[in-house]
Image (cartoon, grey):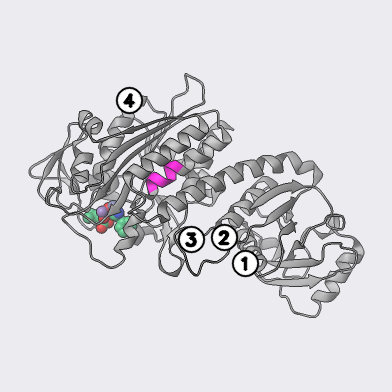
Amino acid sequence: MKFSIKTDHPEKQRSDVLVLGVYDSLKVAYDKPILSISTINYIASILKHGDMSGKAGSSLILYNVPGIKIPKILLIGLGKEKELDGKKYCAAVRAMIYALKKMDVKTISSYIQIAPVIESDIAWNIEHFINEVMDASYEFAELKTINKKTKKTFDFLVNVDKKNQKVAEAALKKSFALAKGIELTKTLGNLPPNICTPTYLGKKAQEIGKEHGMKIDVLDQKQIEKLKMGSFLGVAKGSRQPPKFIILQHNKGKKTQKPIILVGKGITFDAGGISIKPAGDMDEMKYDMCGAASVLGTFETIGLLNLPMNVIGIIPTCENLPDGLAVKPGDILTSMSGQTIEVLNTDAEGRLILCDALTYAERFNPEVVIDIATLTGACVIALGHHASALYSNDDKLAKDLESAGQISMDRVWRMPLWEDYQSQLDSNFADMANIGGRAGGSITAACFLSRFAKKYKWAHLDIAGTAWKSGKAKGATGRPVGLLTQYILNKIY
Ligand code: BES
Ligand code: MN
Ligand code: ZN
């Protein structure tokens, strides 16, 4: 996909197809400034035939419209003029992509992004135009040898008013970098677990670091042992794939600026361990490294943008498998913090690898620490697939993440971290148990992590319901790279 910002009138531009938005009143969005009266009247006369409703998502192709050099016009419905919000706008952009895929076109002159969207500006429109186009045209077919659809790539001429050219170009740069980060996150998630191992994630981190001038460390088993990460190593014991502990450092901010730290759960396959999971849909546990993938994707984006910030990524990564040497229910592990943990269910492994990463984060004297994890099935029951769960010990941090979620349309919903829940983690034999029972399962998982995040401002994102889609549309979503990137950008501007 290629995108370039243009400031032409459609009457002058040359391309294969012109895309215009149409309201359900059958009026072309933003018609006066871009079309001549005769063209507006001509299109209106065709729409009178009733073949297009203008409802959100509807479409119609016109050929050889007088006065326009471009041979085809694709009209995309935007629904009610006064009700064009961000969601409907994004749906219209997706409808455009689905229509374009069926056409024989390569270069596209688009004008739908100049339609006024409630509570947004041209920068937002451009960003979400690119985001939707990239998302709707993503495919993971690298490992198919038959029935491969040929992927269509388009060349988009994204037209704006001349006065908005600079803003639009900045928005394009930002959203293209974001799209690249999201794409990487999706692909890492979709890769099969026999390819995407802890070692593979370590190599990817090194590639990203080399590309963007970041400092990367990939610690091996011995180095992890030296750090006394007994909890993380407990989980890793059941697998023959060696664990890795990955640290990425993007140090492009002032020396005095404390770093933002992102910690991602990197379980490259979660069979549950000795507390083994049922067989149905177990393949989806290849997505249990989506937290890690979102950290790598965010680093790809901030690297491409060369953001003047200090950001550190921390990824504990291993497999969770049953084995003769695997951690067993009843085992007690000593975490890097010194706190002891009775493992009552080996399938609650995410918190066991994250707690040591949270302790490790202390050494960087962070501004904030945000962990991202496909942590609990209970989170999916609580919030479904639309919002990621947000937990935080700091109200300002929580608010900042909520508003970054709104802007990026990658939303979070804050959950309680009350003291009342903590006693569910009581253990008769260790400082705590690794599970808190069925009630409030996402909350008690967060409570567990909070015990290792007392020394700094911390937020936890449970992305179990948002990181991938199941069923026919099975695939990683790339969330919450949009949210994390927006949160970091908001710190600069
Ligand atoms: N990776 C899973 C959480 C998960 C399950 C995410 C299904 C998305 C879909 C996590 O490691 C896990 O197994 N959690 C257990 C915790 C339980 C044993 C307390 C769960 O949610 O069932
Ligand atoms: Mn598990
Ligand atoms: Zn897991």
Q: Are marks 2 and 1 in contact (CB under 8 Å)?
A: yes
Q: Measured along the vertical axis of the image, is residue 103 above or below residue 154?
A: below
**Mark 2 neighbour class, 10 Å CA radius: few under 14, some 14 to 19, many 20 or more:** some
- Give the main secondary structure of the magenta stretch: helix
Q: Where are the magenta residues, as a range?
A: 291-296
Q: Which residue is mark 2?
A: 136
Q: Report how far apart the C-alphas of labels 3 and 2 lie in the structure.
A: 14 Å
Q: Amino acid at mark 1?
A: Tyr
Disc 2 element:
helix
Is the CB atom of the residue marked by disc 4 within 8 angstroms of ligand 3's nearest atom?
Answer: no
Q: Which residue is mark 4?
A: 363
Disc 4 element:
helix
Name, please, the residue furthest toward the left. Answer: 429
Q: Report how far apart the C-alphas of labels 4 and 1 lie in the structure.
A: 49 Å
**Mark 4 neighbour class, 10 Å CA radius: few under 14, some 14 to 19, many 20 or more:** few
Q: Which residue is mark 1?
A: 98
- The nearer-to-camera label among 1 and 3 is 3
